[in-house]
Amino acid sequence: MKVIIKKTVGGTEYAFEIEGQKGLDVLANAGFLASMPGKCGVCKSENVHLASNKAKGFTFVKVICGDCNARAQMGQYKDGGYFWKGWEKYTPPIQREGEGELPPKEYEEEVM
């Protein structure tokens, strides 16, 4: 069985071709791709894009909002199959002073 899914994420249209022997597995993967977020779940902006990164041997796939920097990440079930996690507002980790970056502005002291 083969299924082609066309999905628009932000302003980009993707065409995914899914092929497999088991029809239910193909349809499950097609459903996952069809449910990929096309707009931000936090600020409702359509300025989103598909992104990925690798860390510690794992590949992470997510949809990121270009306006508020929120992201929805792909999850994987232990028994197989995928799902989209809920949208989360992303804030970069705070590094301590002396570790390469300055502390956030709310912690800066005014110097005169």
Image: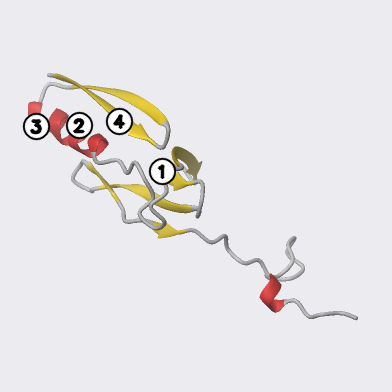
For image coordinates 29% across by 24% down, the residue present is 16
Q: Please state which amino acid type lies under the numbered disc 2.
A: Ala
Mark 4: which secondary structure? strand
Residue 86 found in image quarter: bottom left
Residue under pointer 4: 7
Q: Earlier in the sequence, mark 4 or mark 1?
A: 4
Mark 3: which secondary structure? helix
Residue under pointer 1: 46
Instruction: Examine the rendered structure and indicate whether residue 96 appears above or below residue 72.
Output: below
Q: Are marks 2 and 4 in contact (CB under 8 Å)?
A: no
**Real-space Cα separation, disc 2 to disc 4, in angstroms:** 11 Å
Q: Earlier in the sequence, mark 1 or mark 3?
A: 3
Q: Alpha-carbon neighbours of circle 4 within 10 Å: few (<14), some, or many (≥20)?
A: some
Q: Position of residue 91 (x, y in %)?
A: 53, 61
Image depth: mark 4 or mark 1 in front: 1
Quadrant holding the N terminus: top left
Instruction: Examine the rendered structure and indicate whether residue 27 appears above or below residue 79.
Output: above
Q: Position of residue 105 (x, y in %)?
A: 70, 71
Task: Say the numbered circle drawn on residue 31.
Answer: none
